[in-house]
Image (tube, grey):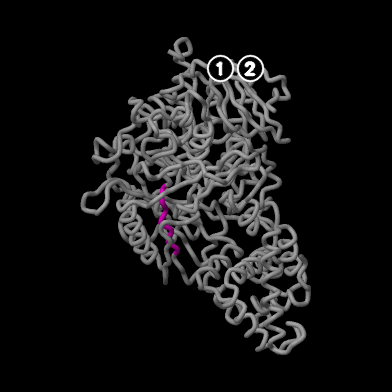
Amino acid sequence: MTKPAADKNEKVDVLIIGAGAAGAAFAWSLADTRMNILCLEQGQWMDPASYPTAGTDWNARGHGDFALSPNERKRPEDYPVNDNDSPISAAMFNAVGGSTITYAGHFPRFHPSDFRVRSLDGVADDWPMDYATLAPYYAINERMMGVAGLLGDPAYPPRSDADDNPLLPPVPLGKLGEVVADGFNRLGWHWWPSNSAIATQEHDGRAACINLGPCTTGCAQGAKASTDITYWPAAMRRGVRVKSGCRVREVTVNDAGMADGVIYYDEDGNECRQEAEVVVIACNGIGTARLLLNSRSKLFPDGLANSSGLVGRNLMLHPYAMTQGLFEQRMDGYKGPTGCGLMSHEFYETDRRRNFVRGYSFEILRGVGPVTTALWGMNAGLVPWGQGHHEAFDAVFDRTAGLLAICEDLPELNNRVTLDAALTDSNGIPAAKIDYTVSENTRRMLDHGVARANDVLTAAGAVATASEAPWKIAGWHLMGTARMGSDPANSVVNEWGRAHDVKNLFVIDGSIFVTAAAVNPTNTIQAMALYIADQIKDRLETLFD
Amino acid sequence: MAINDPTLRAVLDEIIPPAADGSFPGAGLPSVAERVQQAIAEDSELAAEFGTGFAALAELVSADGSETFPEMPPTARTEAITKLSEQAPDFFAKLLSCTALAYYQEPSVVTALGMEARPPFPEGYEVKPWDASLLEPVLTRPPFHR
């Protein structure tokens, strides 16, 4: 039986669902209005002292309670995803801070061309905004998150905010990064120190990075910018409330077809109701589609805001080509931020001489710990059990450098999120199923990325390489399943994030992306959330017109 | 379920034996076996797989005419594990991963690898500042964004 929430179920002005990258940035910005804002989050506040790097079992826990896939991790707050029909597994984290708790912190902007792919390359669609519109919001976001990097990258336009918004010093490349950078230089190819959401010196109350290694299991030092330590404290000081351990089952609507609140389960499993004037969904490219599809009613029998039939479709995952180079020397690869070091945009823009449109970026992947090396080596047949184990292990441990090609996959209707017919989460809510097929264009891009990574690593001195493309575990960029646009027949939300079908319902996460670009999306997700918050603030008198 | 400790330790030593030069211990260390037992105790699916897998091993031991796995001659033990890997590949993959997870966090192993046997936090690691001259070839490149 549905019952009021423990705090008397006060109706709020704005209810945000999801306390991750987007929800936090949006809440902080909208707090300017002094409205009554509440965020419901199914996960909990994390205790940095509990992160794996604070214990000797740090490497093993990355394959256990901090595994990338919720299907492996199986924390109480996780929801399963049926990804049997996808060559790429879904990965997200559920906590206050969302997947920023476990992301690598690589924090590039999109390129101007990423917003104009139809105009420039004749594929997919242009975004209903351009880079210049979003640039001020990137600047705000980078200041709030604290970004390390280096200005002057020829792959990007100059930043007009550079003087007011200086970057922190770049993350050190380390021995591994310098070896790979030398490989790029030998080929005459572009590379640049990563833009990283990592405090390389004390910043806004955060301690400086001390090169713990696996940023993807949470940062015990607090140097990596997860939103539980960046936006949320600032938003809460401005009156925004967060209720953790609350899993939303559905968004409800009134007879007029307006959202009037949600039904959720609290951490004791009680079914509760929360009313709101405005509902904002920020649950990632899988979770948002799942929630909308689970929000069926007489007025919206196919799921909320789904008159276009596009909720859940156009799922984009950024297929990765992962290539490991094997070197004779030790690389000190377990020291320093796992995924941040250097990037290359040599193959980012469309080049008609290649046999694919759009492109990919490269990022280095530092070395891994002994547990991960053993699991990978034994699984790959490089490290045998029994006699010869130690010699084979020594030949690979701390002697690898990874190069990741992040490919821009184009939106396709058949790549989608649906509701699984049988699988549910621990509250009995139908789980998401993803169906994803690597397109021919992406396949060619992946092959190109593998070949060029092989070139770089060989130039850098690798004696052997091995690749996996697409990289199975790497479904951590979730985009496109509630796309934005001006045409209600061809999009789910309008140019400023409001659902075409429900005038007090907003979507603010990566679901609204029209295309995926070829870089990590979090900076753009948050810049978009800040942009939408400003659009709402500018329209308060006419918000529901 | 708890696996017979001497059997488990002997199996783990087959998966990762002590290094011939003594530089690395085998995975049959009591502390490693304890971690494996703990993993089994915390995961009912894993416990069931280990139960089935070790029952299959017991049959191989019996077929060899031995009483227990640890009592078998070294070559016979290796042969039995090889047969087990062929007969029960899914279980064997789990056995390998459990062994690796437990063994490669063992302090004496970590030290033998040349690492410090401590958590990364709070001490962290020193990484020397990068050589900015590496970037000079890129700095000469004209802008190429669209």
Q: Quadrant of the N terminus of chain A?
A: top right
Q: Which mark is residue A538?
A: none
The residue beneath circle 1 is A277
Which span is picked out in magenta? A318-324
Place of residue B8 in the rendered image (x, y in percent of width and height, measured from the top left): 73, 74
Does the image show residue B70?
yes
Residue drawn at 50 percent across, 69 percent down = A380
Furthest toward the front, the residue is A298
The residue beneath circle 2 is A11
Q: Amino acid at mark 2?
A: Lys
Residue drawn at 54 percent across, 65 percent down = A376
Q: Is residue A28 above or below residue B5?
A: above
* Mark 1: secondary structure: strand
Left or right of A352 in this view: A253: right
Q: Upstream in the sequence, badge 2 or badge 1?
A: 2
Write down the quadrant of residue A7 in the picture: top right
Residue drawn at 54 percent across, 30 percent down = A23
Q: Is residue A151 above or below residue A56?
A: above
Tell me which secondary structure the magenta stretch mostly adopts. Answer: strand
Furthest toward the top, the residue is A541
Q: Depth check: give the residue in front, A143 or A452.
A: A452
Q: Chain of mark 2?
A: A
Say whether residue A372 is magenta: no
Place of residue B90 in the rendered image (x, y in percent of width and height, measured from the top left): 58, 68
Q: Depth check: give the residue in front, A284 or B125.
A: A284
Disc 2 to disc 1: CB gap under 8 Å: yes
Mark 2 and mark 1: Cα distance apart in space:
8 Å
Left or right of A237 in this view: A464: left
